[in-house]
Image (tube, rainbow, N blue to C red):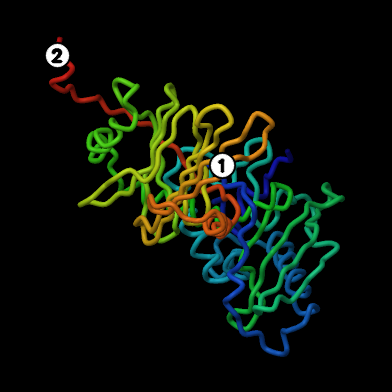
C-alpha cells in the first residue's frame, strides 16, 4: 500500500466506519428517465467529462490552496446532488467514528471513491468505454492509472446530466466485487443516524419476552448483538438480534404499539434476504427442506410464503407444498410468487454489542 502523503493535506476528496456491503451492484432505476440535451447526448461528451474529472484533480493537486474557499471537491464539482448528500451523510458518521472511516478497507485503504489507490504522479482514465443508456443515463468503464499503477484499476460510473453537464451519480469498485458505493454509503449514513437515536435498553426486555416462546429449549433467552436494517427500504428500521453462543436469531418490527417478531432462525435454519423480504430456511428432517418468507411493505407484514419439500431415498422430489398466509396454494402459484422476489441481496448490517443485565423473574426463584 502506497503512502498517501498528499491525501493528508488536500481537501478535494472526503474520506467517508463500519461494514461495507459487498453485493451485486444496484444500478439506477431503469424506469426513471432523465433528460439529455442533444449537445450532450453523445459518447464523446461523456468521455470528455470523464477526462475532465482527472484533469481537474491533477490541476488542483499542482496548484492547491487550502485557504481558497472556492476550491471544490471532486464530489461538488462532478457529482450529482444525490451523490453529494449521501457522501455528506457518510462523512458525518465518520466524524463520530473511532475508526478509519467508511473507505478504510484494511490493507487496501484508505481508498478514495474517485481514485481508488492512484495518487502517485499524474492520474488519468485509460481505455474508456461509454454507453448512453435508454433512460438518459450513461455507463462508463475505464482503468484509473497513475505513475505506479500502470496496469490500472477497473472502475465503473453511472452518470446523468444535471446542471447542464454530465455528473457522476454512482461509482462502483469493480476490483471489490462491483461494490456499489452509492447504496453502501447511503445505508452507512442511514444506519448511523438511526442507531444514534435508538435505545436498545428501552426495547430489550419486551422483545426477549416475545422471543421466549420461540426458543423454549434455551434458558434464559438472551441476545448478544443487534443491528438496525431496512428490509423494504422505507426509511424505517427493523431490528435484527442474535445469540452468538446458542446460535439463534430473530428479526423484529419496531412498532411502538405492536412490536412483534417477523421471522426467526436457529442452528438448523439460516436467515437470508431479498429486496423487501426475509427468508428463514433449513432442514426439517431426513430428506426434508422448508422455507418461510415474510414480505414487508411500509415496515408492515404484507404476506407470508411457506414451502416444504420432501425427497425420497433416491433424492427425487416427492412432495412440494406451498402456503400463503397459512393457506395452501397451488405449486405453480407458490413458485411464481417466490420467483418474483428476485435474487438474494446482502443488506447493510452493522452489529452492535448488547450489554444489558437481565432482570430476574419470579420463575427464577421457583424450586
The residue labelled by disc 2 is: 366
Which residue is nearer to you in this view: 49 or 237? 237
- Name the disc covering residue 319, or none: 1
258 relative to 75, above or below? above
Residue 161 screen position, x and y as percent: 63, 79
Secondary structure found at label 1: strand
342 relative to 200, above or below? below
Q: Are marks 2 and 1 in contact (CB under 8 Å)?
A: no
Q: Is residue 312 left or right of residue 281?
A: right
* Residue in the image at 31% along x and 25% along y: 216
Secondary structure found at label 2: loop
Q: Quadrant of residue 145?
A: bottom right
How far is mark 2 from mark 1, CA to CA? 46 Å
Which residue is nearer to you in this view: 281 or 47? 281
Residue 322 screen position, x and y as percent: 49, 49
Res 17 visible: no
* Residue in the image at 29% along x and 21% along y: 220
Please identify the quadrant where the C terminus is shown.
Answer: top left
Q: Is residue 317 left or right of residue 19?
A: right
Q: Nearer the viewer, mark 2 or mark 1?
A: 1
Amino acid at each position: 500500500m502506497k503512502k498517501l502523503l498528499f491525501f493528508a493535506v488536500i481537501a478535494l476528496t472526503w474520506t467517508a466506519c463500519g461494514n461495507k456491503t459487498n453485493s451485486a451492484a444496484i444500478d439506477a432505476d431503469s424506469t426513471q428517465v432523465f433528460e439529455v440535451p442533444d449537445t450532450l447526448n453523445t459518447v464523446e461528451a461523456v468521455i470528455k467529462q470523464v477526462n475532465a474529472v482527472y484533469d481537474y484533480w491533477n490541476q488542483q493537486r499542482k496548484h492547491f490552496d487550502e485557504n481558497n474557499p472556492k476550491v471544490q471537491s471532486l464530489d461538488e464539482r462532478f457529482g450529482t446532488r444525490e451523490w453529494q448528500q449521501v457522501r455528506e451523510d457518510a462523512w458525518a458518521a465518520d466524524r463520530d467514528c473511532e475508526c478509519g472511516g467508511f473507505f478504510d478497507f484494511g490493507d487496501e485503504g484508505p481508498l478514495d471513491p474517485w481514485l481508488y489507490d492512484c495518487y502517485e504522479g499524474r492520474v488519468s482514465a485509460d481505455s474508456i468505454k461509454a454507453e448512453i443508456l435508454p433512460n438518459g443515463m450513461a455507463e462508463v468503464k475505464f482503468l484509473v492509472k497513475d505513475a505506479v499503477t500502470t496496469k490500472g484499476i477497473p472502475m465503473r460510473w453511472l452518470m446523468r446530466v444535471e446542471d447542464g453537464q454530465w455528473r457522476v451519480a454512482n461509482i462502483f469498485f469493480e476490483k471489490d466485487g462491483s461494490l456499489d458505493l452509492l447504496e453502501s454509503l447511503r445505508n452507512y449514513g442511514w444506519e448511523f443516524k438511526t442507531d444514534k437515536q435508538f435505545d436498545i435498553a428501552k426495547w430489550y426486555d419486551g422483545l426477549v419476552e416475545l422471543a421466549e416462546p420461540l426458543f423454549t429449549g434455551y434458558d434464559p433467552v438472551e441476545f448478544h448483538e443487534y443491528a438496525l436494517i431496512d428490509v423494504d427500504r422505507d426509511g424505517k428500521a427493523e431490528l435484527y438480534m442474535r445469540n452468538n453462543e446458542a446460535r439463534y436469531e430473530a428479526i423484529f418490527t419496531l412498532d411502538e404499539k405492536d412490536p412483534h417478531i417477523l421471522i426467526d432462525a436457529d442452528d438448523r435454519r439460516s436467515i437470508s434476504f431479498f429486496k423487501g423480504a426475509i427468508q428463514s430456511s433449513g432442514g426439517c428432517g431426513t430428506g426434508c427442506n422448508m422455507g418461510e418468507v415474510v414480505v414487508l411493505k411500509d415496515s408492515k407484514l404484507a404476506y407470508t410464503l411457506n414451502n416444504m419439500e420432501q425427497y425420497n431415498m433416491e433424492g427425487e422430489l416427492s412432495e412440494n407444498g406451498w402456503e400463503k398466509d397459512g393457506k395452501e396454494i397451488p405449486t405453480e402459484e407458490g413458485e411464481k410468487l417466490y420467483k418474483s422476489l428476485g435474487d438474494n441481496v446482502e443488506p447493510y448490517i452493522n452489529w452492535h454489542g448488547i450489554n444489558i443485565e437481565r432482570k430476574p423473574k419470579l420463575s427464577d426463584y421457583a424450586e
